[in-house]
Image (cartoon, rainbow, N blue to C red):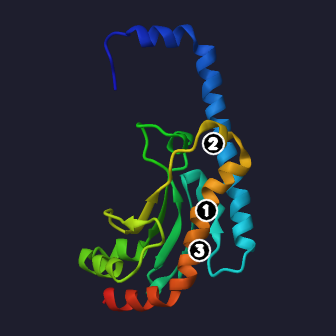
Amino acid sequence: MRIKELDSSHHCLLENLKTFHKMETSYEEIRGYIADVLEALARDLNQQPSLVKFDHKTIPKGWLEASDLPNWKGTGHALVNIGIENLAPDAIVGSSVVDQCRAHVYSAYFHNINNETAMTEFRQKLRPPQGFVEAKERGYLFTMDLPELGVEDFCNRQELTAYFSKPLNLLVNWLTKNKESLRQTAEVAGK
């Protein structure tokens, strides 16, 4: 985007470049803090007996998830991924500029077969995890927007960990409980 004239906001920025660069650095440090909290949480979750393992390498991309049956029907796509996404600081503490942090149940398999009828059938035959709603986006089965987290709680490592761990534990338990029905329903809906 190009502009022909600078207004008072640009003047303010130019007069405060040192502060601006400090804020940029601080924002990146906050992103690193979130990543550190999530990496520790992923390690803890992966030590629990479960059928899924969380991949911390996705955190820099803006999500943390685990998959069940990563190569469903030999397609190279997971039948179901569970996780959280939109991990930017402003998505957690609240901003109208970015999408809110949310937990999800996603199916790369159904996203890639591009069959809305099959996806709808699959979604309708499953009970969503507690607090989740049917998703409207292609590939997503269920989502739950996480509430905004206050700045004080965000800065408290235990509170931020709990903010992420509650929906992730809920999803792990849901997936464990529904493993067989997911596979059976997918067999029928995906034909």
Based on the displayed image, in which of its 4 quarters is residue 57 positioned?
Answer: bottom right
How far is mark 3 from mark 1, CA to CA? 10 Å
Q: Secondary structure at mark 2?
A: helix
Residue 108 x %, y % = 42, 72
Badge number at residue 166: 1
Seen in the image, is 33 located left or right of residue 77?
A: right
Residue displayed at 66% across by 49% down: 160
Relative horizontal placement of residue 38, taking residue 186 as reference (left or right): right
User: Which of disc 2 and disc 1 is earlier in sequence?
Assistant: 2
Judging by the rendered image, the residue that carries numbered circle 2 is 31
10 Å neighbourhood of mark 3: few (<14), some, or many (≥20)? Answer: many
Residue extending furthest toward the front? 130
What x and y, as percent, mark residue 64? 58, 60
Direction from residue 9 to residue 14 in the image, left or right? right
Q: Report the disc number at residue 2.
A: none
Mark 3: amino acid: Val
What residue appears at the point 58 percent right and 14 percent down from the top-left corner?
A: 17
Q: Which dot marks residue 172?
A: 3
Identify the residue at horizontal 38%, vertical 65% (top origin): 133
Nearest to viewer (mark 3 / mark 2):
3
Camera sees residue 138: yes
Point out the image quarter for the C terminus. bottom left
Nearest the viewer among 70 and 166 is: 166
> Distance from label 1 to label 2 (Cα)?
20 Å
Across and down, in percent, residue 56 comes to 65, 61
Where is residue 139 drawn, in percent x and y? 37, 69
Of tags 1 and 2, the one toward the viewer is: 1
C-alpha gap between disc 3 and disc 2: 25 Å
- In which quadrant will I find the N terminus? top left
Q: Nearer the viewer, residue 56 or 100?
A: 100
